[in-house]
Image (spheres, rainbow, N blue to C red):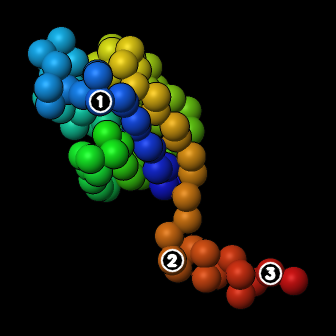
């Protein structure tokens, strides 16, 4: 299952400029791969739209329970102290194509 996350923060809380939030963000970067591994989750991609203060992350997860486990880690919880993170399941091109072809 693929899960897309979109994280948004304000310019006032941008970790590129605020020491307090930079420390939290660097800790998340340091721990994300090991935290993912604990729950069987794999980060597929990570993209930043810096001018919009928005981050896009794509994860492959065996279940939403595993994804919620990742979201409950202290590092991710700390990230939610200064930004909003939305999570939603997504389908790739082939999954979408197969679904539409098979629809009746």
Tell me what residue is drawn at x 52 percent, y 79 percent. Answer: 94
Classify residue 103 as left or right of residue 81.
right
Q: Which residue is mark 2?
A: 93
Q: How many marks?
A: 3
Vertical order, 72 against 42 (above or below): above
Vertical order, 68 against 90 (above or below): above
Please identify, in this view, whether the residue under mark 1 or under mark 3 is nearer the observer.
1
Identity of the residue furthest to the right in this view: 104
Q: Is residue 73 visible?
A: no
Whole-percent x, y for residue 62 in the image: 49, 46
- Using the image as rendered, state which of residue 28 and residue 73 is in the foreground: 28
Label 2 residue SS: helix
Tell me what residue is drawn at x 57 percent, y 46 percent. Answer: 88
Q: Which residue is mark 1?
A: 11
Q: Which residue is mark 3?
A: 103
- Using the image as rendered, state which of residue 26 and residue 43 is in the foreground: 26
Q: Quadrant of residue 29?
A: top left
Quadrant showing the C terminus: bottom right
Which circle's residue, 3 or 2, is located before the other in the chain?
2
């Amino acid at each position: 299952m693929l899960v897309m996350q979109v994280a948004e923060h304000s310019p006032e809380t941008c970790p590129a400029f605020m020491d307090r939030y930079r420390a939290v963000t660097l800790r998340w970067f340091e721990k994300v791969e090991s935290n993912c591994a604990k729950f069987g989750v794999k980060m597929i991609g990570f993209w930043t739209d810096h001018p919009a203060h928005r981050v896009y992350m794509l994860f492959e997860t065996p279940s939403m329970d595993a994804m919620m486990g990742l979201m409950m880690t202290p590092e991710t919880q700390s990230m939610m102290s200064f930004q909003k993170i939305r999570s939603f399941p997504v389908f790739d091109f082939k999954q979408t194509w197969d679904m539409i072809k098979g629809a009746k």
